[in-house]
Amino acid sequence: MIQQINNNKSDKQLTKSDMGRIAFASCLNLFHNLTMFRPYPLGIYFLARSYYVKRIDGNNYQYQYCYVTTGRGGSVTMDAMYSWFDATVIKNQNEIKNIHPDLICNRDGDERLLIKCWYDNPNQNIYPYNKSKLGLFLLNAKFGENGNFSHNLVISPKPGLFPGKNE
């Protein structure tokens, strides 16, 4: 979805609104409705982080972090997707490698994007999770960045999508 969302626009650069729509669509395969928003009737919510890099020269990279979640916001709509892009900064190759080794690019001008997605359990006391609500009867699901429902993906984004804008 990241690669295709702006195909019909002349300005291909992604916005935080684009990232919110992408995250919303990505969640629907589990939620099928607005249950990913507060008060979290399934007891879990969705988070996604992306780490964009572009190699400037052998040791320097342009870097930008993006965060998207249904874990904040008050209304129960797609507009409640909480998202933002951090400012673009310069990091050295060791700093990028510490984020994820697959972000290291081979040539100047190459770009990579690490996408981390997972479901989390905000607060068991306020938003109780019951595995049977998800149809899980044998699996005791672990949530969080390293839980059962956590995925990491590194792609080479189409040129012009990043760095993202907070519009």
Image (spheres, rainbow, N blue to C red):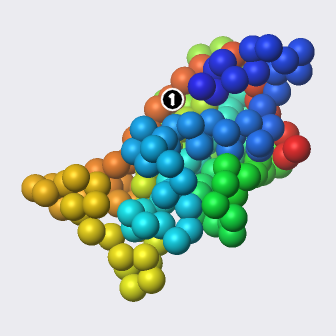
Q: Position of residue 51 (x, y in %)?
A: 63, 41
Camera-side residue of 49 and 44 = 44
Inspect the image, locate mark 1, and give the three-letter code of the amino acid beneath it: Val
Residue 112 is drawn in which quadrant? top right
Check the image and report above or below for 108 versus 146: above
Pick the front one: 19 or 157: 19
Locate residue 52 relative to residue 90 in the image: left or right. left
Residue 134 falls left or right of residue 120: left
- Residue at far bottom of view: 125
Closer-to-camera residue (141/107): 141
Rendered-image quadrant of the C terminus: top right
Q: Residue at x 82, y 27 (%)?
A: 13
Would you place residue 107 above or below residue 74 in this image?
above
Seen as rendered, the residue at the extreme left is 138
Residue 90 visible in image: no
Q: Could you classify mark 1 by the number of other residues whose Cα lies within 10 Å: few (under 14), some (14-19), or many (20 or more)?
A: some
Residue furthest out toward the front: 33
Residue under label 1, please give it. Answer: 154
> What residue is drawn where x is 56% and y is 61%?
37
- Tally of marks: 1
Residue found at x 43% / y 76%? 127
Q: Position of residue 24 (x, y in %)?
A: 59, 43
10 up-or-down from 35: above or below: above
Residue placed most toward the observer, 18 or 34: 34
- Residue 138 at x, y percent in the picture: 10, 56
Picture quadrant of residue 133? bottom left
Location of residue 54 with respect to 49 vertically, above or below: above
Mark 1 lies on a secondary structure that is: strand
Q: Can residue 40 be seen in this view?
A: yes
Point out the image quarter for the N terminus.
Answer: top right
Q: Which residue is drawn at 64% across and 66% down?
A: 72
Residue 17: give x, y in percent of width and height: 77, 42
